[in-house]
Amino acid sequence: QLERDEAGHMDERVGELLTAVLERNELVADDLISIWFTATPDLHSDFPAAAARGLGIADVPLICAQELDIEGAMPR
């Protein structure tokens, strides 16, 4: 989760998440088919997928989508 909507902070947190997922599942970029990122409507400083590119995930298709802003849904 992001504490603030800043590109550098998003890169850091998404990088931490991706690194943890890859390590815990003993995966490397070559094992990936694609990665889908979703973000809540209040985040607009950067694309979450940019952090993956920063980690060297270059040949994997990435897509970003916005979560629906549904009344009563979990807050970001």
Image (cartoon, rainbow, N blue to C red):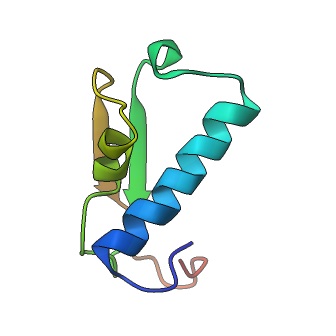
* 67 on left or right of 65: right
Q: Position of residue 30 (x, y in %)?
A: 46, 13
Q: Position of residue 74 (x, y in %)?
A: 61, 77
Q: Nearer the viewer, residue 32 or 8?
A: 8
Q: Is residue 52 visible?
A: yes
Image quarter (top left, top right, bottom left or bottom right) of the N terminus: bottom right
Which quadrant would residue 8 be assigned to in this image? bottom left
Please tell me which residue is depicted at 32% across the width and 45% down the height of the picture. Answer: 54
Q: Nearer the viewer, residue 76 or 68?
A: 76
Question: How many labels, in total?
Answer: 0
Q: Is residue 1 above or below residue 24?
A: below
* 13 on left or right of 42: right
Please tell me which residue is depicted at 58% across the width and 43% down the height of the picture. Answer: 19
Q: Is residue 43 above or below residue 13?
A: below
* 12 on left or right of 62: right
Which quadrant would residue 28 be assigned to in this image? top right
Q: Is residue 67 visible?
A: no
Q: Position of residue 67 (x, y in %)?
A: 40, 64
What residue occupies the far right of the structure in this picture? 24
Q: Position of residue 3 (x, y in %)?
A: 52, 84
Please tell me which residue is depicted at 48% across the width and 52% down the height of the picture. Answer: 15
